[in-house]
Amino acid sequence: MIKKVGFFRSIHVKFVLIYVLLILVAMQIIGVYFVKQLEETLRTNFQTSLKARVNLLAYNIVEEMKKERTPEDPTLEDDIKKILRDFEAGDISEVRVIEGRSLKILGTSQQNNQGVVGQRTTELRIKQSMVLEEDQSAIKIDRQTGHRIWVLSTPIKSGKKVIGSIDLVAKIENVFEQMKTINGIFATGTAIALSITALLGILLAQTITRPIADMKKQALAMAKGNFSRKVKVYGYDEIGTLAITFNNLTKKLQEAQAMTEGERRKLSSVLSYMTDGVIATDRKGRVILINEPAAEMLNVSRETVLTQPIVSLLGLDDTNSFEDLLEEKDSLILDYSTKKERYFLRANFSVIQKETGFVNGLIAVLHDITDQEKIDVERREFVANVSHELRTPLTTMRSYLEALADGAWQDAEIAPNFLEVTRTETERMIRLVNDLLQLSKMDSTDYRLSMEWVNFVDFYHRIIDRFEMSKEQNVSFKRMLPVNKIFVEIDEDKMTQVLYNIISNALKYSPEGGQVTFSMKEEEDKIIVSVSDQGVGIPKENIGKIFDRFYRVDKARTRKLGGTGLGLAIAMEMVKAHGGAIWASSKEGKGTKISFSLPYERSEEDEWL
């Protein structure tokens, strides 16, 4: 299914955005250059105008300083004060005249600051202007007003000799205010221009995107199987030619679809009703068809595996190439087993060939043979285990019976020992056969339990008491059982056998002086019964196998103790028959804990109480 194009991903919006951004970038480049040049021009004109006035003032000051004065004439300071009074202007804050040798201030244009006349100046730029004999200027911030000011120190020369300096402080903030106003006008013009550009871009984009939108609708209709619509041709440019081509394509597809629909229906019907998995490839081994059973067997999505190489899909990259599969005459067994479960498939291959003999593809048919393989493996393991379990006691019995037949029966000391061993091995075979018969009955479909309500706490205590009285090892028992009555519906005989098998195992593997712990707890809908020992424990990799038939962690020690390897398997089957579950937990060197659950209803308990 084609997703709807987002607003910001549509070509319409992209076209308008690109159009507007191009105009914006162009205007910004022009604006930055224009504003920078205009600011430079205004500032230069302002400074040039003031410098011209300062130069004129310097000429007048030189004339006054060179004039010979009589006692009746005004002093130099008075003449300079008069000249500076005429020099006042709105854009000039203050002008000072400084004498060269003494750095004494001869006059200032500020009427309210005449107290500085006659004082020495400490301004560094004034000294620099006279020493370097050139103008010293800078733009600074007025601490009182916060506005920008322009300071200028110009040396006063008489011939080639510097006789003083003029220090000017001018208000240049007006220049920057003018630039701020110009920037505002430019920003407003830019916004208006962009708005108009956006509107024109939308109109222009519509003329381009409208035919494309029509073709998109036609493509969506074609995807749904509707070939009757046609794209409207708005002109005979490149997009118009594309629309005409699209209409011709629609017509061709409609004809091809009508021809292939019948064949597709036939093939789809056959594949849908097949229980086997079917995979078809092209001549390069890429998957072009896979039915639902095959996708389920391989646990893949039908859409994602199309065009994928079949050798990769089947996991045969390391062992087979596509050419090997084309020449494969026998079926292949595909093993997808994991540590948790077994899974096998059988694959049969058939080559698709044209009449000329040219290979056009490959058909693979998959069969699930997991159950068959599992049965074969279990059958082989069962036969091997039973044979081994029976061969050991029979071999022992034959050896001792041959010895007795050769005359050992006449030896009063040896004969009873040989007969005792023979009897023990016979009982061992009888236990093995009985366990096998028990498992066979539980595997049959007509297996029945004689269920009755039993106070499981008392029942558990009785089983523990029986073992405590008959135990031969130096092992202590610890009981952690509830004091209240808990009634559970069980087959008492079968559950006795379950606990007997579990506790027997715990005692067998408990060390001298060890402890066996019996516990029980009730939960919402079940009870948990546990038996823990302090034996050597079970390796982590073997913990999940102890309920398998004939499985032993330590085979030599188990046979020495007389075990058949079926006790926990029988316990598991009986617990499952009661609707419960059984599991084990263990730490090597610390012991093993076998637990099982049984269904429990509190309402039934209340009735018994």
Image: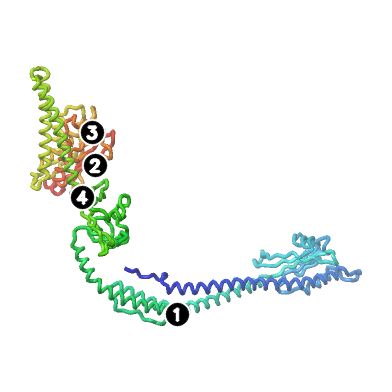
Which of the two residues, 43 or 256, is positioned nearer the viewer here? 256
Residue 544 marker: 2
Q: Secondary structure at mark 1?
A: helix
Measured Cα–Cα span from mark 2 to mark 4: 20 Å
Measured Cα–Cα span from mark 4 to mark 3: 30 Å
> Left of 182 or right of it: where is 287?
left
Give the answer, above or below, for where 275 lies relative to 251.
above
Give the answer, above or below, for where 322 lies relative to 449.
below
Q: Nearer the viewer, mark 3 or mark 2?
A: 3
Which of the two residues, 494 or 401, is positioned nearer the viewer here? 401
Residue type at tag 2: Gly
Measured Cα–Cα span from mark 2 to mark 1: 73 Å
Residue type at tag 1: Leu
Residue 203 marker: 1
Q: Secondary structure at mark 2?
A: helix
Q: Nearer the viewer, mark 2 or mark 4?
A: 4
Residue identified by numbered label 3 = 554
Q: Nearer the viewer, mark 3 or mark 1?
A: 3
Tell me, yes or no, if residue 541 can be seen here. Answer: yes
Residue 310, position as x, y percentages in the image: 29, 57
Give the position of the N terminus as an image quadrant. Answer: bottom left
Going from the N terminus, do you reach mark 2 or mark 4 first? 4
Going from the N terminus, do you reach mark 2 or mark 1 first? 1
Residue type at tag 3: Asp
